[in-house]
Amino acid sequence: PPEENLTELMEFVLLGFADIPHIQWFLFGLFLIIYIIILMSNGTILLITKMDPSLQSPMYFFLANFSFLEICYVSATLPRMLMNLGTQRRRISSVGCATQMCFILMFGATEYLLLAVMAYDRYVAICNPLHYPLVMNHRVCIQLVTGSWTIGIPVQIGQTYQIFSLPFCGPNQIHHFFCDIPPILKLACGDTFVNDTLPYTVAVLFGMVPFLLILGSYSKIISIILKLPSATSQAKAFSTCSSHLMVVVLFFGSAIITYLRPNTGNSEGTDKVLSLFYTILTPLFNPMIYSLRNKDVKMALKKLLFHENFQAEAGSVLK
């Protein structure tokens, strides 16, 4: 088409849950409660891993980073979704859309890498316990975390730029509740072959590679655990990694299905449901999984609550 007919879209419409108008307020209330729970529960894990002396090991340093990441990750999608549900104004500028996509992709890449780092930490702790303090010293932990947070940044900025430099000349309605790659690419006109293959390449790089590293770590861990002499020591060793394994399955499972399954015409509903899993349910369940299955975290929580109650009682007595 002639260049002047290509009207560059300056904004998009995030349809979200527009197809179920009668439960908009119910959804608003539900997601608001979920968002508050995510902020409070991940915030509590951040707090106790900073304050409690018994939680100063590498494992909890990574867990604190993971909880902070979950807060960032969910804050890239949920506030916007709540605003759209509350005001029914679903417009988002193309710059706003690109920014949201970029942050979601960066936090997603960080999550994959951090989960791989946490698996490596468990591998060293269980397979080389004597060398653990030496291998996982403070400097190494800082380097691993910094790497996890920064490696994805240039790649994801590049990928977002590549996608948004496509011409958008047709409908501007995004069948999703945030700016994700598949629904945005459906709106682009012209040849999107490079952009269609790019997400797969990036997904393999940041999804499959960490996933294989995690699988490798866990196959070693399980073979070591099975060689332990008593059932008690086997159970104890396995309990330290079972919570991490549950988070891995939840996050990787839904994300890999979303990005690596073949693109069919009527997959919008499925995409929405799957992305709810990895953008909302993982941050929601992560603190529960870690605190319910971990004695140290439970003890630290009790101490924190007891300390708060004790201070409150002391305050009322003094009054």
Image (cartoon, rainbow, N blue to C red):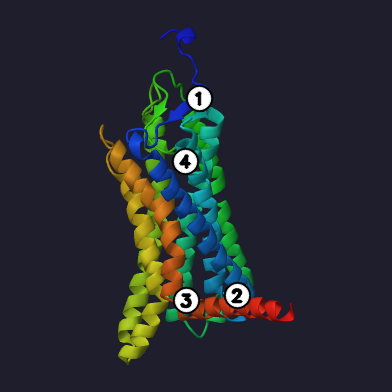
Q: CA distance from mark 4 to mark 2?
A: 41 Å
Label 2 amino acid? Answer: Asn
Between discs 3 and 1, the one toward the N terminus: 1
In three-dimensional space, the C-alpha distance between marks 2 and 3, rounded to whole angstroms, equals 12 Å
Contact, mark 4 vs mark 2 (Cβ under 8 Å): no
- Label 1: few (<14), some (14–19) or many (≥20) C-alpha neighbours in 10 Å: some
Q: Residue furthest right?
A: 318
The crowding category of the residue bearing disc 3, from other C-alpha atoms within 10 Å (few below 14, some 14 to 19, many at least 20), is some
Residue placed furthest toward the front: 319
Along the line of sight, the residue nearer the viewer: 189 or 16: 16
Between tags 1 and 4, which lies in front?
4
The image quadrant that residue 233 belongs to is bottom left
Whether residue 270 can be seen here? yes
**Mark 4 or mark 2, which has the lower sequence index?**
4
Label 4 sits on residue: 81
Residue on which the image places disc 3: 124
Which amino acid type is shown beneath numbered disc 1? Answer: Glu
For label 2, count other residues whose C-alpha is less than 10 Å away and answer few (under 14), some (14-19) or many (20+).
few
- Secondary element under disc 2, as helix, strand or loop, is loop
Residue at 68% across, 77% down: 316
Question: How far apart are the alpha carbons under marks 3 and 1?
Answer: 49 Å
**Which residue is disc 1 drawn over?**
11
Q: Residue at horizontal 49%, vertical 20%? A: 9
Observer-nearest residue: 223 or 52?
Answer: 52
Query: CA gap, disc 4 to disc 3?
Result: 40 Å
